Image (cartoon, rainbow, N blue to C red):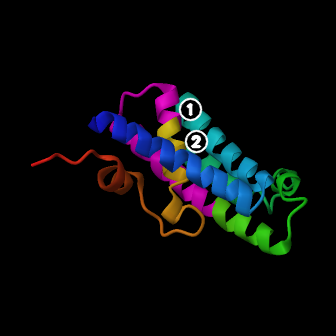
Amino acid sequence: MIAIGFQLLQIFHLVLPIVYIGYILNPWVLGLLLIQIIVMFAVSEFCPHFLTIWTTAILFLMSHQLPILHGMPNFFLRDVTEEERHLALVAMFWMNSRCVSFCLDHLWNEQTLSKIGKLTKMTSFCFYLPTCIVGPLVNYKEYHEGVLKPKSNS
């Protein structure tokens, strides 16, 4: 029974914020955030070294300033208001911090999960609704212990 509740909680943490961001901000902003998660996940899976994770994270942070990467955020933020653009960039920066936290935690703690299970956990952590758009920053270890770890009935 606890395992079913745990899985439902993960699905809730995954679906509700995605629907919320897609509706409130813009589906393009949601696409930008999802691409960031997928790229960080791919880097952590195929090049599992802390330097590649940090390099990818820094490139995402600088993507709206570097001429070579300038088109990526602008492509996703082309039809948004100035307020939505600002919120999208702030959300992208917070998402970047969460991606780094998750990737480094899984790199250093050698957890055995399937790739789909790991991607689901990463996405649900990155889109955790109370901290999704503006923080505060909660690292993955605190999130897992406080939100996802099943409580014993003692």
Please say whether residue 61 is visible from this viewpoint: yes
Indicate the position of residue 110 as horizontal and vertical percent values: 35, 33
| Residue under numbered circle 1 | 47
Q: What residue is drawn where x is 86% and y is 70%?
A: 81
Decide which of tag 1 and tag 2 comes sooner along the chain. Answer: 1
For the magenta stretch, what is the residue range?
Answer: 93-119
Please say whether residue 50 is visible from this viewpoint: no
The answer to if 108 sits in the magenta stretch is yes
- Whether tag 1 and tag 2 are in contact, CB under 8 A, the answer is yes
Front position in the image: 93 or 48? 93
Q: Secondary structure at mark 1?
A: loop
- Figure check: 132 above or below 103: below
Predominant SS along the magenta part:
helix
| Residue under numbered circle 2 | 52
The three-letter code of the residue at mark 2 reads: Thr
Q: Secondary structure at mark 2?
A: helix
Pick the quarter of the image with the N terminus: top left
Indicate the position of residue 122 as horizontal and vertical percent values: 50, 43
Q: What residue is drawn where x is 83% and y is 50%?
A: 72
In the displayed structure image, the side of residue 58 where residue 121 appears, left or right = left
